[in-house]
Amino acid sequence: MAVLEPLDMTDQELGGGATYNSANPFRIAPRYKRFCGGILTDQAGTVNLQLRTATNATFRTLQTFARVANTPATWDFVWPWGGETRVQIVNGATPQTDLIMEAWGSP
C-alpha cells in the first residue's frame, strides 16, 4: 500500500472571482510520482494543477477541471516531470461560504 503524505490543505472561503494558490509549492519528484487530491465547494469554479521546473519560474497549468457546486471532485495525476507543483482554485462569480481542499503525494 502506498503511503500518502499531505502536501496542501485549505478551507479558505473565496470571494467572487477570487483565486487561491498553494501557499508553499511542493516538490513532487523524485519522492512522489502521483499528485492526488479532493475538493468540495458550494460554488462553481475551476481547479488548475500546475507545475514549474527549475529552469522556469512560471507555473504552467497541466490539468484543469471544472468544479460543480456541492459536488465532490478528486484527482489522481501521474507527474513524469520533476519540479514543484501547486493547486490553483479559481472561484466563479458567487462568493463561497464552504470550501475544503486537500492534496497529497504518493510514490
Image (tube, grey):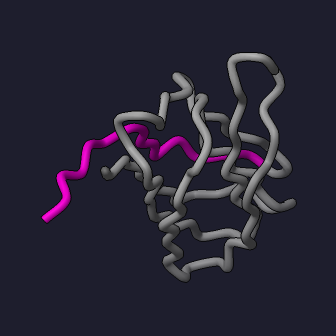
Vertical comparison of 62 with 60: above or below: below
Quarter assignment of residue 50: top right
* Position in image of residue 66 (x %, y %): 74, 72
Main secondary structure found in the magenta portion? loop
What stretch of residues is rendered in magenta? 1-15
Q: What residue do we see at 42% from left, 34% from top? A: 30
What residue is drawn where x is 31% and y is 50%? 107
In-front residue for pair 19/55: 55
Q: Is residue 5 left or right of residue 100?
A: left
Q: Quadrant of residue 38?
A: bottom left
Measuring 59% from the left and 70% from the top, which residue is drawn there? 42
* Frontmost residue, 30 versus 38: 30
- Quadrant showing the N terminus: bottom left
Judging depth in this view, the residue of 28 and 23 nearest the camera is: 28
In the rendered image, residue 35, in percent from the top left (x then y), is placed at 47, 53
The residue lying at 74 percent from left, 46 percent from top is 15
In this rendering, the answer to whether 44 lies above or below 22 is below
Residue 105: where, in percent of width, then height? 37, 47
43 vs 72, left or right, is right
Judge whether 101 appears above or below 72 on screen. above
Taking depth in this image into account, of 13 and 79 the one nearest to the observer is 79
Q: Position of residue 47 (x, y in %)?
A: 69, 58
Q: Is residue 95 above or below residue 70?
A: above
**Residue 12 drawn in magenta:** yes
